[in-house]
Amino acid sequence: MEPFVRVASVAAPLPIDNVDTDVIIPAEFGVTMERGGLGPHAFNGLRRFPDGSERPDFVLNREPWRHAKILVAGANFGCGSSREHAPWALRDFGFRAIVAPSFADIFYGNCFRNGILPVRLPAAVVTDLMEQAGQGANAVFTIDLESQALVAPDGTRHDFAVDPWRRRCLLEGLDEIGATLAGAAAIERFEAGYARRRPWAARAG
């Protein structure tokens, strides 16, 4: 997984509350077990007409937001089903961070597992950031995970909270499996010591 330390980018404003995972990636595209390739289908119902052509008024079909690495969204983002394909699609599209007043719990955890930083900020702050994001190419946001701060285009700094373990995993590019493997030597030492102290239990295992 690609580490997340700092990202500077325009931010795509999506002023919609309760965007569920079926909106993020419609069910018909969620049949794959491959993480790559879902980006073109992210927000398919919002981005495209039924014939597959792009809706010219949708933010992600317009410059400069077509290449945004940051999404500023409404409350309860990622609600609905727990499909992990939603963060897969967002990451494959190019997003590294999502800023919103609140997230659905399972989606929030899945973001960290897939190299996306979900940033929770007060609703009034997000509304202001949404307006700044709409200014276009000169409105660059910077999100720094080491300092746990978002700097808006107007220079205002907004500190955000993040679980220390999840922060460490993102900084080092580790999911749960990677974090476990990083402690392989300690696990092996424990197992060897446990077998010496309790040989009967080791044999039973």
Image (cartoon, rainbow, N blue to C red):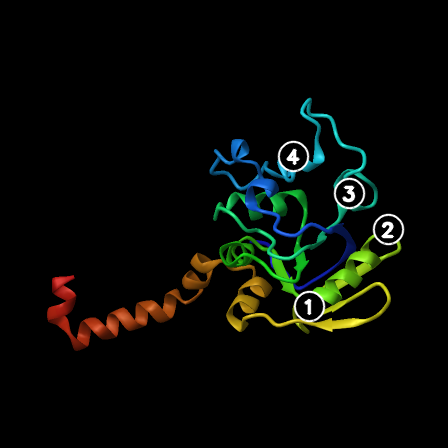
Give whichever of discs 4 and 3 has the lower sequence position: 4
User: Residue shown at 18%/77% (left/top)?
Assistant: 197
Which residue lies under the disc numbered 3? Answer: 59
SS for dot 1 = loop
- Nearer the N terminus, badge 3 or badge 1? 3
- In the shown orientation, is residue 102 left or right of residue 152? left
| Label 4 environment density (alpha carbons within 10 Å; few <14, some 14–19, many ≥20) | some
The reply to whether discs 2 and 4 touch (Cβ–Cβ < 8 Å) is no
Could you tell me which quadrant the C terminus lies in?
Answer: bottom left
- Residue 16 placement (x, y as % from top left): 69, 50
Determine contact: label 3, label 2, CB under 8 Å: no
Element at label 3: helix
Q: Amino acid at mark 1?
A: Pro
Marker disc for residue 45:
4
- For the point 41% across and 61% down, which residue is it? 181
Give the residue type at disc 4: Gly
The picture places residue 37, in percent across and down from the top left corner, at 59, 36
Measure the alpha-carbon separation of dots 4 and 1. 28 Å
Q: Give the residue at mark 2.
A: 136
At a point 57% along the width and 62% down the height, the residue shown is 170
Q: CA distance from mark 3 to mark 2?
A: 11 Å
